[in-house]
Amino acid sequence: MSSASPSLTPRVAIIGAGPAGLMAAEVLSGQGLGVDIYDAMPSPGRKLLLAGKGGLNITHSEPLESFLDRYGAHRAFLEAHIRSFDPQALRAWVHALGIETFVGTSGRVFPEGMKAAPLLRNWLHRLRSQHVKIYVRHRWQSLEASTTGWRLQLAGPEGIRQADHAAVIFAMGGASWARLGSDGAWVIPLEALGLPVAPLLPSNCGFETHWSEHFRSRFAGEALKNIAASVRTAGGTTPYRRGECLVCESGLEGSLIYALGASLRHELLEAGEAVLLLDLMPDRSLEWLREQIAAPRGARSMASHLQSRLGLKGVKAGMLREFCDTATYADPAALAQAIKALAVPLHAQRPIDEAISSAGGLRFEALDAQLMLNELPGIFCAGEMLDWDAPTGGYLLTACMATGRAAGLGAARWLRQYQTTTEIAPA
Ligand SMILES: Cc1cc2nc3c(=O)[nH]c(=O)nc-3n(C[C@H](O)[C@H](O)[C@H](O)COP(=O)(O)OP(=O)(O)OC[C@H]3O[C@@H](n4cnc5c(N)ncnc54)[C@H](O)[C@@H]3O)c2cc1C
């Protein structure tokens, strides 16, 4: 299927009013192009608003090289887009909306007040002043080539309607928190168009383990602070990362788990089980631990010996007891080793609907450098629906906005090229 040339009055349709779609709209309307945004939900930016509930982490202040590394194997596809809208530029953009930003102790960047609502409010106000039209309760269903570009089929409050547009930007999000609008239903129509989509999988979510009832009832809800962790792989282990995580009813979650999430997910898919290795005392060497544990303990239990010699107590001591067999617990050398690399078997991820984001999506091989579909000229894609993944820390929103901007610029450029070749003037 290939589209005809754009109409005399080109308008661009954007499907999805999340941060990626809104950023594309801003770029296009800023260049004087007409923009219609369609969103299935009753109001725009619902996931962005939810993200603001726990403190909207908009980007990160670390050096750009380390920042880009957070996208792992997907860095190659995102790098150019993020370099042209990097964390500095993103902060400047927030400031231009009249909202200051600050860097938290972890290097994460937040808008003043940490909420998304003021930012979204000011953003929508600016878009409307740039004549962007937002149609809520409009669910995109399918598309076909038309004489003026692309004809969209939309299910709206008044039933099915069709809308013709010169170009289209898809920004329909991933598949977590479906009740906020991004439900991954776009996979079926896009695959029907022959587009390659990597399965949508939970990312930045908890992993399940089998706690004993005793451990769960005592420690669920407690944080494991100042630890390090890595993932056992077929070839060894991934590098240890420092951080913290939370013991929950079903397993472990939190920023350290999210940071290792891609490796854990890979192991689950490949081997059916993932093994998390926890260093419960990353500031202490194995030798030091061995010496301390081997010191005479008299009539004291091992638990009180560990508490008095190492300061190991509470949830950390509970974890050790939970995952060490009796022989290991009684042997100072093996116990020291367990404290440095406690093997925690994880058997499943939490469901995608609970996840902060999803991995997988439309594969980059289907897109050109402007994020236009190779096989469907005039159709662009952006945001979390693309096949990339990143941990929490502001990397998600940065990439969504950077790709939204790139798709908007790409669509504007593409329409200009058509104007040049067909000598059509925009509206
Ligand atoms: C609890 C939580 C906290 C988070 N916190 C942070 C954070 O602090 N920092 C960070 O970087 N990221 C955070 N994220 C992730 C971030 O919010 C998302 O990555 C981001 O919103 C994705 O942007 P998007 O524009 O690609 O998609 P979305 O924001 O998901 O928007 C997609 C839009 O498309 C619409 N849509 C879908 N299908 C259709 C259709 N067929 N027709 C019409 N409309 C459709 C949906 O209704 C939705 O409005 C958080 C996510 C969650 C769930």
Image (tube, rainbow, N blue to C red):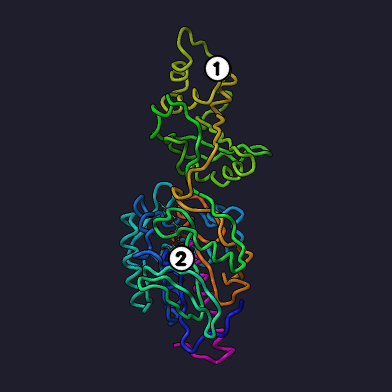
Give the residue at x 54% y 88%.
419
Magenta-colored stretch includes residue 425: yes
Instruction: Residue 202: give x, y in percent of width and height.
Output: 51, 49
* Left or right: 357 as drawn, with respect to 262: left
- Tell me if I can see residue 102 in this picture: no
Count the numbered circles shown: 2
- Mark pair 2, 1: CA separation: 53 Å
Q: Which residue is mark 2?
A: 20
Identify which amino acid the numbered label 2 is placed on.
Ala
Give the residue at x 50% y 42%.
257
388 w.r.t. 240: above or below: below
Identify which amino acid the numbered label 1 is placed on.
Thr
* Left or right: 103 as drawn, with respect to 288: left
Instruction: Residue 140: give x, y in percent of width and height.
Output: 46, 69
Question: Which stretch did the figure color magenta?
Answer: 400-427
Instruction: Residue 423: give x, y in percent of width and height.
Output: 55, 92
**Mark 2 residue crowding within 10 angstroms, few (<14) / some (14–19) / many (20+):** many
Q: Secondary structure at mark 2?
A: helix
Q: Which residue is mark 1?
A: 326
Magenta-colored stretch includes residue 426: yes
